[in-house]
Structure formats: C-alpha cells, structure tokens
Amino acid sequence: MERSLQSMQLQLQFLMSKADDLHDCLVNGQGQSDRDALAAALPSFLYTCQPYFNHLESTARSTVSQNTHLPYEIYKRLLDFSQQLCDRLEQLVLTYASYSLLCLDETEPNSMSHFCIGQSQLGRLRLTVFRYCQLTPYLARVDTGLYKRMRWNVERLRDHQQQQQQQQQQQQQQTPADEEQGGESEEGKAQTAGDTEYYFLCYEDTPKAHAEADSDSQGVSRGNVVRTWSIGQWVQVKPDPATDDIYDWITCEVPQASYHRLLFLGTDEPSSCSATDYLQQLLLSHQTAE
C-alpha cells in the first residue's frame, strides 16, 4: 500500500505540473491561435484527470461500504490527493474564465460550469461527484435563493439476477429495427442502468433569528443574515415525474425541482471531500435501514 501511495503521489505531481503548464501558457500566450488551442486543451486535460479521480475515490470510499480495513491515515491521504487536484483544477478553470476563454454560466450550452471529480460504488449505489467552479443558482431560470456548489449523481444498481431477467425481457420485446442496430433500445439501456437520484451541496442566506439590527437600518440588514450550508435532494416537480404525457416533457424547456434538505452543515463551507463524506454517511445509513 505504501508503494501504491507513492505511485499515486507521483501521478498527482505530474497532473499538478500539467495544470501549472496550462496556467503559464495562458498567462504568457499571445495571439488568437494560442487562445483557441488553450481553450481546447483545458476540457481535454480535465478528461485526462478522470481515471485518477476515479481510482482515488473508489479505493478510499468503496472500502468503507465493504467494511474492509483500510487504515484511516491511508484513507485520509487518498482523499487529500483528490482534494488537492480538485482545488487546483477549480483555480485553473476560474483563471481561464477570467480570460474569457470559457463560460461558467450553466444556461449556456457549451459552458464549463462544473467538472467531475470521481466515481465510486457504495454497495448497490454508484456515486458520481461533480464540483461547480463557482456558486450557481439551484434552478437556472427561477430565483430560489439557493446556490449549488456540488452535485452527486447516485445511481441505484440492480443485482445480477434482476439485470439478467430484465435483459431477457428486453430481448423478447426487441423490434427488428433494434436488432438491426445491434443491441438494446435506448429505453432498455436506461432500464438496465437503474434509477438515478440527484443530491446537491447548497447554501442560502437566511435571517438570523435574534440578531441586532445595525443602527438606523430597517428590516433585515447584512448583519442579520447568515449563510448556511446543507445537503439536499433534487425532487422534480415540473414536469411531473409520474406523468405519461410526453408533451409535458417536450414543452418543458427547463425542468424544475424543489430542494429537500437532508442535512444542515452550518455556516462553514465544507471541502469537496468532506461534503462527500457527509453524503456517504447518509446513503449508507439509508441502506442499512432498508
């Protein structure tokens, strides 16, 4: 394990060095051709970092759900590597945005508002983590007062027997067109993959219950507002998830959802690794209850 940690640390140093190179090329670059090349290089580099994030997260977190005995110090070192790279990539994306090489507005089709920072499996749950580079409104076109910082896609995997039965049913229901295309229909693939739930790390500014107002001020002043962080679940309200009317989905340009708070984290923003720790504990506790 110690040799493995040394190898992962060397990989971290290599990726951090590559991030520094991209930053230096941006700052020192000249000409439109350089800008275009750099704008294309950043998404490619983020993609290159994915296997490393996945390895760190899966090695550290999957052992927790499997009750294997990974020493706590090693667990922390793995997540520290992940946190260091996450922070560096976030700074790099923000720097590129400050040079107008990319857009962080989630409503824009080609924006880079967030990036993936790893995937792991907790029992029958597959957890994929995304980090927003800046605070982003919870809903794109509705002011809810909530701003998201992280998202977790939690996919509920079916056991092997259920998957086999479902695949047999899909094969029996397959149309000749599906067979000519060489496999399952898109609907069959979605069913095999299982249901996906979405969780967010968000903050909101709320009035203090017993704060003293600033002198000569009325209503809620800046001193009477506190920023609180929480983890909650996306609960879709529009279109209705239970509806069978396809036109409800076609005519809904942007889905809307309420925010079901599950855990209050206080006034201090947690790191990305700490926030995932909190969600992991929630998910594992629900698994145990089930």
Image (cartoon, rainbow, N blue to C red):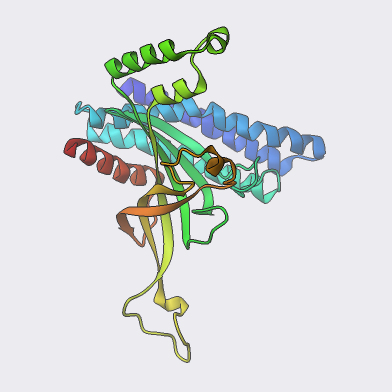
Within the image, what quadrant is residue 273 found in?
top left
8 on left or right of 14: left
Can residue 162 be seen here? The reply is yes
Quadrant containing the C terminus is top left
Name the spot of residue 74 as percent of width and height, x first. 28, 32
3 on left or right of 240: left
Name the spot of residue 71 as percent of width and height, x first. 22, 31
Name the spot of residue 102 as percent of width and height, x first. 67, 43
Name the spot of residue 192 as percent of width and height, x first. 39, 22
- As drawn, the residue found furthest toward the front would be 245
Query: Is residue 48 placed above or below 165 in the rendered structure?
Result: below
Query: Is residue 242 placed above or below 260 in the rendered structure?
Result: above
Identified at 62% across, 50% down, the residue is 105
Which residue occupies the foreground of this view, 253 or 64? 253
Identified at 52% across, 61% down, the residue is 143
Identified at 46% across, 76% down, the residue is 222
